[in-house]
Image (cartoon, rainbow, N blue to C red):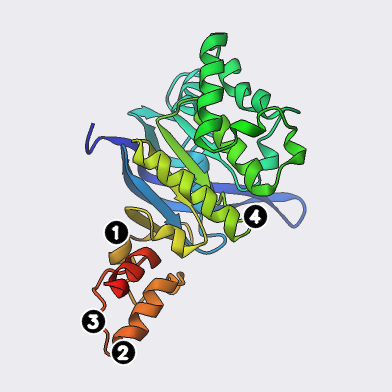
Amino acid sequence: MANEAIIQFKNVSFAYLQEDDGSTQAEKLALDDVSFDIQRGSFVAIVGSNGSGKSTLAKHMNALLLPTSGSVLIEGVDTVTASDEAPWEIRKKIGMVFQNPDNQLVSSIVEDDVAFGPENIGMPPEEIRRRVDESLKMVDMYEHRKKGPHLLSGGQKQRVAIAGVVAMDPDCVVFDEPTAMLDPRGRREIMAIIRKLHDQGDTVILITHFMEEAAEAERIIVMDHGKVAADGSPEEIFSKEDLGVLNVPFAVSLSAKLRESGFDIPAGTVTEEKLAEFLCR
């Protein structure tokens, strides 16, 4: 349903407990009064420097962490006040793919690994078989289904991890820096899968350090010291000159230099594809 919020953050703060002087515990504020909605079917990138609260934010989206104050609602269900069974239902709806695929692979055979999630939520065997095959084909790993994950490249492992999440048929997939450990080719392959998921109607949330990846989203949320520093379209975000926490994408900086040289580059050219398309015309 258009404009329906699948995830809502309402004045969310979160503090980690850490030891101070080896004896007492002090609180370190990681999220500070954060509020925003994620609309169903949208593609949102969350960016910011190390320690800005991005990954803490992600873990609140499927109840791996619960707010110290404020509330997180997943399809209207409050992660704090919901029943004891609610977190498991939330994690069926909000899948997560982490930075290191080795932390998500649990079996010695690729197809068994993808089947692990569906088996644990009690799907019928024939449904599991169908979902495993479809998920592996979607990430272009079907021909590797009988291999051991230890024989795969980093990019291939990440694709298997994504297939394992997709096989659960979540409403939303949160990617927490999924390309950080990959080479440029592996990054391109994962971004192609992310775009495919969004094109087929899934809600996608991408946490990334790479601004070229963020530029492909419909919306960017910028985190800084646990707060939302900016929230808008890529064109709006990368036109701001006061966001020192960001490095602009290559296409944005090149467009600026070309304008200085007399080229009439349209405002809002934030991806290399759009820039190349304009220059070729």
Q: Which tag, 4 or 2, sits closer to the chain's start?
A: 4
Left-right relation of 242 to 115: left
SS class, disc 3 = loop
Q: Residues within 10 Å of mark 4 (few under 14, many from 20)?
A: some
Decide: is 209 above or below 141.
Answer: below
Q: Which tag, 4 or 3, sits closer to the chain's start?
A: 4
Question: Visible in this render: residue 35?
Answer: yes
Q: Decide: marks 1, 2 in contact (CB < 8 A)?
A: no
Left-right relation of 257 to 122: left
Q: Residues within 10 Å of mark 2 (few under 14, many from 20)?
A: few
For marks 3 and 2, give the CA distance: 9 Å
For marks 1 and 2, give the CA distance: 24 Å
Instruction: Determine which quarter of the picture holds residue 79.
Output: top left
Please name the residue that numbered disc 2 is placed on.
Answer: 260
For marks 4 and 1, give the CA distance: 27 Å
Q: Nearer the viewer, mark 3 or mark 1?
A: 3
Name which residue lies at 71% across and 50% down: 24
Q: Decide: marks 3, 2 in contact (CB < 8 A)?
A: no
Please name the residue that numbered disc 1 is placed on.
Answer: 233
Please name the residue that numbered disc 3 is placed on.
Answer: 264
Please name the residue that numbered disc 4 is placed on.
Answer: 181
